Image (cartoon, grey):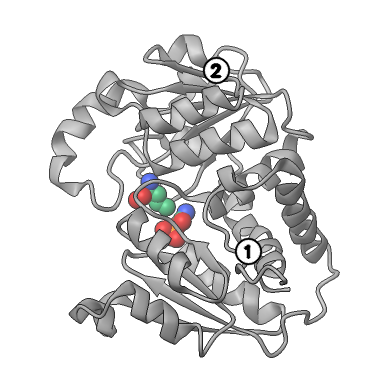
Amino acid sequence: MPDRTPKHFLDLEHFDTATLRDMLTRGSGFKSGGAGRPLAGKALVMIFEKPSTRTRVSFEMAIRQLGGEAVVMDRDGSQLGRGETVADTARVLSRYVDAIMIRTTSEAILLEMAEYASVPVINGLTDRTHPCQLMADVMTFEEHRGPIEGKVVVWSGDGNNMASSWIQAAVRFRFELRLACPEQLMPPQDVLDWAAAEGGNIVVTSDVEAAVEGADCVVTDTWVSMGDEENSPSRHNILRPYQVDERLMGLAKPDAIFMHCLPAHRGDEVTPGVIDGPHSVVWDEAENRLHAQKGILHWCMT
Ligand code: CP
Ligand code: NVA
């Protein structure tokens, strides 16, 4: 019996390095002009339970440029918002389209969608991870600084969904990741335990200045992720020492790059001098969402 499990893209931890590299190679190939229309006749539905600019537009343009088409469905404008089950939604959408991309409030919803869909499901961000962003981030790092294997990446800030995906990426792409986070906002222990069991080179600390010494790349993210708004004032107080400013960037390697998945909050997690300064590659990073996701879509849908 052939394996009929759809080729989901749920998290980096589920893939070996070669498969992730294959997706990136496809993405870079499309970026350098070898597009054609390999997804002609295919359709993607994109479900949003949270806002999005980059994920929404880059996925839509990616599938269109590969010859396919996209339909957007937001939770409140669909029957999901009135209680239709995720399982039933997955079964119905699988009869209409060739892949489902979902940005959701809870990882359990992503996993239920994947369990009941008979087409590939792509994780467009959950409360736990954001793997599509990491594919773009690895692509961007390597375009600017060469192979990421063995390099040093420093995360400064909230141990959030992006931090978890950076941990998974560090294991799969074999770079050193130093996470500088306040005690109260450390990355989830199960993700750190998984990385340790996989032999990942991950350091967790609250000392951001020590962490950043010799870094090839400094990364941060918003202090208040979507869904975390309730505790926003205390988060600002706790995270203030983790702001990436010119002084902190100056402790990294002289040619270190600065990355941020965006949207950014200048004056909070990053100063204007850093995000708009010479170390920043954030616009290339945002562009690469388009190219990396072409690689993911092509891998999932062919
Ligand atoms: N980085 C990112 O996923 O951005 P959006 O929330 O705009 O999709
Ligand atoms: N950590 C952020 C990422 C946004 C792309 C959030 O979840 O809101």
Q: What element carries label 1?
A: helix
In the image, 131 versus 278, the foreground residue is: 131
The single residue placed furthest to the front in the displayed view is 1
The amino acid marked with disc number 1 is Leu
> Dot 1 corresponds to which residue?
290
Name the amino acid type tagged 2: Gly
Give the answer, above or below, for where 230 lies relative to 86. above
Counting every numbered tag in the picture gives: 2
Q: Quarter for ligand 1? A: bottom left
Task: Using the image, tell me which numbered label, if any, was put on residue 246.
Answer: none
24 w.r.t. 294: above or below? above
Within 10 Å of the Cα at label 1, are there few (<14), some (14-19), or many (20+) other Cα atoms?
Answer: many
Alpha-carbon distance for marks 1 and 2?
A: 31 Å
The answer to whether residue 223 is above or below residue 86 is: above
The disc at residue 250 is 2
Left or right? Give the position of 168 relative to 50: right
Q: Which residue is drawn at 54% across and 76% down?
A: 118
Q: Does the residue labelled 2 lie within 8 Å of ligand 2?
A: no
Q: Quadrant of residue 241?
A: top left
Q: Which residue is drawn at 45% across and 42% down?
A: 162
Image quarter hosting the N terminus: bottom right
Q: In this view, does 98 lie to the left or right of 54?
A: right
Rendering quarter of residue 151: top right
Residue drawn at x 72%, y 87% is 40
Q: What element carries label 2?
A: loop
Name which residue lies at 34% across and 26% down.
Answer: 186
Quarter placement of the C terminus: bottom right
Instruction: Classify 10 Å Cα crowding around label 2: few (below 14), some (14-19), many (20 and above).
Output: some
Left or right of 175 in this view: 146: right
Asked if residue 223 lies left or right of residue 59, the reply is left
Q: Which of the two discs, 1 and 2, sits closer to the camera?
A: 1
